[in-house]
Image (tube, coloured by chain):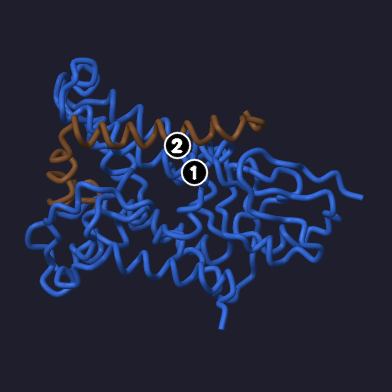
Amino acid sequence: MMLSRERTRRLVQFASLLLSNLYFKGWLDGSIFTGRTKIFPIPGLHCYSCPSSVLACPVGSLQNIISSEGFLGGLSSGRADALVILGILGILLALGFLAGRFACGWICPFGLLQDLLYRIPTPKFTVPATWRNAKYAILLLFVIYLPMFVRRVPGAGGDPWFCKVICPSGTLTAGIPLVAYDGGETFQLGFLFSWKVAVLLVILVWSVTSRRPFCRTICPLGALWGLAGKISVFGMRVDDSCVRCGKCRTVCPVDIAIFEEPNSAECIRCGRCIDACPVNAIHHDTGGEKVARGR
Amino acid sequence: MKNLPLFCRILLVIIAVAAAVSGYVWGDPTVIWQKAANVCLECIGVG
């Protein structure tokens, strides 16, 4: 029996979640995994302080290298700890140049969570298209600029600002479980924790009422992969047989009209539009794009 | 950019893979591990 594309995607999403969280012991004793696999980033947003995580968070890793003491000087002098940023960026960009935001649709654990939350039956709302641009500002400001240039003491290291003030994955998969396990013995909770829980709650509730709002408006990984996806090897193609009926947009988890822009920076390559198209006009393709003119 | 030939797109993938390999070979991935193997206080909202 052949699985439908959507069922296959869901299976891959759950398999990715399982494979990146093999340290089950962490949930029992409040520890985190310390093995060497944590030098490699997961292709998605998943906190490396999650008790069961066996891989590193790419966004957290990038920020920590960028915010390290003397990062810019270290990069120019070939310092080994600064050079490793090439490794993480290389992995992320290789995925992006290969298939754009494929990882958002098929691998990212936080994408899966949003997909599941949207299935809760409530009134649904669209996300204004202009809000999509916010994720590029967040990438530049919170992942690059602030970690690189804001230092409490001149010459010292900085902070991973995206993790610190925004990342809901860190709060959900690491903050709340570790703080609950700790029971207030070690961790001193204050405004920052309350702020992060509030951000998480807003995003969770928003995910119930809108499709993948975090991916579309906030995620810095989505911003990076989206830009790379515009020139990726594997993209989408819409044939001239398209009748512009809009069924593709109705099922699209990121609310794009693929017949207007087949390789949109928002497309997560889930393929739901391919299955929904009544005239089979939408396909996966390699290189270039063909925009439908309609009939 | 949208009409970038396929070989250029493949070249970009190859360059990115080369960057990843060189970053891990000549860089020091221990710096990633050191952060990832300890509880990230900023990530959990107490740092």
Q: Is residue B43 above or below residue A197?
A: above
Classify residue A2 as left or right of residue A294. left
Task: Mark 1: give few (<14), some (14-19) or many (20+) Cα within 10 Å.
Answer: many
Quarter-of-image position of residue A188: bottom left
Looking at the picture, tell me which residue is in the foreground, A145 or B25: B25
Question: Which chain did the image draw in brown?
Answer: B
Question: Which chain did the image draw in blue?
Answer: A
**Residue A273 picture location, percent across and down:** 68, 60
Element under disc 2: helix
**Residue A164 picture location, percent across and down:** 28, 44
Quarter-of-image position of residue A176: bottom left
Tell me the kind of residue under disc 2.
Val
In the rendered image, which quarter contains the N terminus of chain A?
bottom right
Q: Tag 2, which chain?
A: B
Residue under the point 72% across and 66% down:
A276
Looking at the picture, tell me which residue is in the foreground, B46 or A236: A236
State the CA–CA distance, disc 2 to disc 1: 6 Å
- In the rendered image, which residue does mark 2 sit on? B13
Residue under the point 18% across and 63% down:
A178
Q: Tag 1, which chain?
A: A
Classify residue B18 as left or right of residue A180. right
Labels 2 & 1 near each other (Cβ < 8 A): yes
Name the mark on residue B23.
none
Residue under the point 14% across and 60% down:
A33
**Residue A69 picture location, percent across and down:** 16, 25
Task: Mark 2: give few (<14), some (14-19) or many (20+) Cα within 10 Å.
Answer: many
Looking at the picture, tell me which residue is in the foreground, A161 or A78: A78
